[in-house]
Amino acid sequence: MKVCIDPGHGGYDPGGIGNGLKEKDLTLDVCLKLKPLLEFNGISVILTRDGDYAPGHYENDQKGDLGARVNSAELGKADLFVGVHINAGGGTGVEVLVISTGGRAEIAANKVLPYLVQVGGWANRGVKTQNVMVLRETSMPAILTENGFIDTATDAAKLKEPIFRQALAIAHAKGICDYFGILYKEASSTQPTPSVMYRVILDGKQTMALSSQESAITEVKKAVDSGQVSGGVVQRTTDNINVFEYEANSNVSKTPIMGEETITIEQCRQFLLKNNSNAPDIIPFYKKIGENLGIRWGYAVAQMIRETGYLRYTGVVKADQNNFGGIGAVGNGIQGASFSSQEEGVLAHLEHLFAYVTTQPLPAGVQKVDPRFDLVERGSCPNWEDLNGRWAVPGNGYGQDVVRIYGEMAKETISDSEETSILRKISQIISNYFYGK
């Protein structure tokens, strides 16, 4: 049995603030107290963070931050995800959130909630459904507890007390044990809290911290051997020394985002029109701008196809936004950025890739139109496969999908008659657009 415990907020994001308290501090303290209680009862624990930072060390990037929390649970193959939060906005009481009713998550919520109500003497606000990313994107049952209101004086007075936060941790532990059918055992007062933790760092990002060095090594090997990451280390928290390092087989190749392109405009056009005969002709923009930025623009076309469904726009992003990379569409129905023209939309898409690939400034004369250019971790993704869990969350196989679509496009054979037919079809589309014929 394994639980991913997620202390809400952290680092750049304080969460709720009130009565001299910050939500990120309270949730971390409760979760650090909860971890040894669960381990004492035979339940393995993954912590998404063990200090005041955003998981994945993102800054002002909520999508990346939340995605890193989801990735911790997925990579660790947790059986249950538990987010711990404090409410705000006026009110009192405790509630537990789930993505939907009728499943294992609702069962877990109803196991945990009574213990939280009892320990706080709070009003029972019930189990509620809410479309939260960490509940929606996790494959295992997931719940999120809201423990009192930080901006209500009576609730805050309890939360200020370390003894109460310990009791709150015990309440969580009892409910989680009930969910797994375990008879909760009280930890001895002499039971030591682990003083040494071992960070699991995958492709430069911390995904969890474990009290067992052997367990941490196992998690690194599992993630690397399964192809989810290219390498990982186990780092001891007391001195930040790497006690274990592990790299993928050097024969496993990746696909660089930057470089010279060999595919042709005609191949991309033919492939796109076969799948959507009404697709606008934006491929020349990708070639012109991609070559200027040094990006293999054919792969960017493949990514555009994946993001927009062959420019059919079956998701939240709509055609009039000219947002071909889904920039800013971070979930919960948020449609993301809009651009004034198709060419500007292509430029923003390629600039976003450029930001991920390199720390260099944009070439002279290129206007920065990507609104999230400075929010990504510059230089973190030199290859398409590195975008997994970053451009898309959870994003398993995202970069590989782009490469696969590119491979299909590259198989297109263009004859003179086919090229003429394509140009004729494009001309007809343009004519229909301008003259309504």
Image: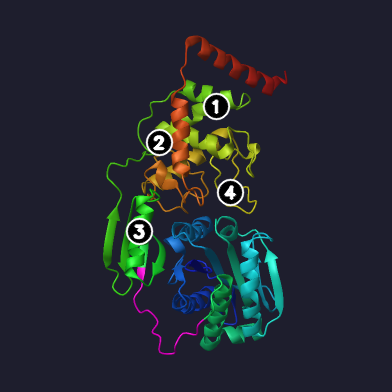
Residue farthest right in this picture: 436
Image coloring type: rainbow
Task: Say what amino acid the circle numbered 2 marks.
Answer: Ile
Amino acid type indicated by mark 3: Val
Q: Earlier in the sequence, mark 4 or mark 3?
A: 3
Residue numbers of the magenta segment: 185-198
Tell me the residue that label 4 is attached to: 329
Asked if residue 87 shows in the view, the reply is no
Residue under the point 56% across and 49% down: 328
Residue drawn 53% across the image and 49% down it: 371
241 to 301, vertically: above or below: below
- Cα distance in 3D space between marks 2 and 4: 23 Å
Mark 4 or mark 2, which is nearer the start of the sequence?
2
Residue 367: x and y in percent read 48, 41
* Above or below, comparing residue 111 to residue 327 in the picture: below
Q: Spatial distance from mark 3 to mark 1, Cα to Cα?
A: 40 Å
44 and 58: which one is in front?
Answer: 44
Question: How many other residues sit within 10 Å of disc 3, few (<14), some (14-19) or many (≥20)?
Answer: many
Q: CA distance from mark 2 to mark 1?
A: 20 Å
> Which mark lies nearer to you, 4 or 3?
3
The residue wearing badge 3 is 220
Residue in the image at 60% along x and 43% along y: 338
In which quarter of the view is residue 357 placed? Answer: top left
Mark 3 vs mark 2, CA separation in Å: 32 Å
Q: Is residue 162 above or below residue 348?
A: below
Q: Which residue is mark 2?
A: 295
Residue sitting nearer the eye, 25 or 75:
75
Task: Single out the mark in the foreground, 2 or 4.
Answer: 4
Of the image marks 4 and 1, the number of the one nearer the N terminus: 1
